[in-house]
Image (cartoon, rainbow, N blue to C red):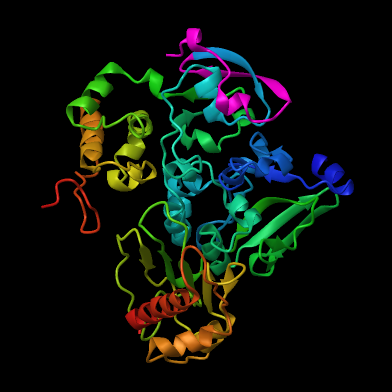
Amino acid sequence: MANSANDRAGPGAGESGATETFNMSFTLNGAPVSRRVPLDARLLDVLRYDCACPGTKEGCGEGECGACSVILDGLLVNSCLVPAFQAAGRVVTTVESVAADVASALNVTGTSQCGACTPGIVMSIRWLLERPEIASNVDLREFLSGNLCRCTGYDGVVAGAEAALTLRGIPMRGVARPGPGDRGGSRP
Amino acid sequence: MMLADSASRGEPVTPIAGGTDVMVSWHHRAKDKLTLLDLSRVRELAVMEWTGVGDGASLTLGGLTTYWDVMQSREAAAAYPLLAEAARQVGAVQIQTRGTWAGNVGNGSPAADGVPVLMAYDATVTLASVRGRREVRLDEYFTGYRKSVRAADELIVAIRLPPPTWGVQWFHKVGARRAQAITKVGVAMVRRAVVSGQMSVTRGHAIPAPSASRRSAVVGERASGAPDAAGSWRVVANSVAPTVVRCRMLESALDSGRIFTRPDEIESLLAGDISPIDDMRSTAVYRRRVLARLIYHRLAQSA
């Protein structure tokens, strides 16, 4: 959860050069928050620097890597591409609120890699847990293609998604296997 | 009103819905020059609507309809399968939940993945301003690189698709990798089926079963009994010209029944339709060759 002791204006929000600010109220991980933020801040900046939720990472800043994934009004989004003003009055869920049982399932399967891509991956999996109707109809590899990891394979991530879904009793369309085009860790 | 006021003062305003295109350059400080008009709370624009019933039903996408909305609509995906297919190939889910069809049109990128399928389906764009509404054919909408017939005070409020009467329906995207890559060459091909009231397969066109592949969709013939009507083919390509482009010379050749025996023949014909460039993603030669071969092999498959 947000830790207000760490609340400060950081580089993302503070150095944007904008002089205009606005008061932004929204629901963050179940609690109402209100912050005065630059008009041109991204949701990502507000979460990290104004709301003390640094779990959400900035990777590419262009909507390709998924490290900044959060759930906004029930939809999985890249927070780097959401202007903060669009999130005003809405409900935002970040990786800080991940449930212990899910975290443990992800740890056991090797999904938790380093801190750069993992928070985004966890949020993608979280979203599937909230949307069983989607979970049972998607190819997990395709679904997770919005989360890039530059260090290692994706098999642990897919295994983690399967473990988390199984833990919550959510049926899957089938167990995903690496295709010929994938350079998965299990490839001989 | 704000759009009208700003336009009358000559101040450019950029309407924003999902922001997946605009926000990328925002990050590079191009934002300093931008005035954004947030549409995300305009509920009326979020409606996806059907008109008519049965086979004659047509679909209207609202200005805020996202790729995800279409992917999640069983009806939309069934009636207009290429929409769902293209939507799955726009970024990944984090982009699909935010990106809108109207935004893809409005942004005007020649690499837009949503536009080729809309254009192949003969979509029209509804533009609204304080002066009223007008409807423009999507294949007459773009006037140049990121230029269109849209006036500064006009907003894309809807995209209308005529009732689905297509036989061949195919979309293929070539990118640097399977997911999350901007298109090097893309093509949507559609053949209008002449509905004669009797279900039959167009002569000489045995279409394979729908492909499960993420890369391409092949959808079976709908209802067709009569000989091919003039203007029955639509071939729309992206990333090969300053705009998403209809390949009209190729379409006429196909409509006249011309048979191609080599991909080169299609490539020379396409020279009149496309004008690819060398850029960071690919070369003009590659784009020309790949587009011609994609089309050739798809046609060979159905011959």
Front one among B276 and B28: B28
Q: Position of residue B248 (x, y in %)?
A: 58, 81
Using the rendered image of the protein, determine whether residue A168 is visible from the camera's viewpoint.
yes
Q: Quadrant of residue B181?
A: bottom left
Q: Is residue A47 left or right of residue B47?
A: left
Q: Position of residue A152 (x, y in %)?
A: 25, 42
Q: Residue at x 60, y 46 (%)?
A: B25
**Residue projecting furthest to the right:** B9
Using the rendered image of the protein, determine whether residue B163 is visible from the camera's viewpoint.
no
Taking the magenta stretch, the answer to whether it contains residue A6 is yes
A164 w.r.t. B175: above or below: above
Q: Residue at x 35, y 62 (%)?
A: B215
How many marks can you see?
A: 0
Taking the magenta stretch, the answer to whether it contains residue B297 is no
Q: Which residues are magenta?
A: A1-30
Q: Quadrant of residue B271?
A: bottom right
Which quadrant, please, contains the N terminus of chain A? top left
Q: Position of residue A83 (x, y in %)?
A: 60, 33
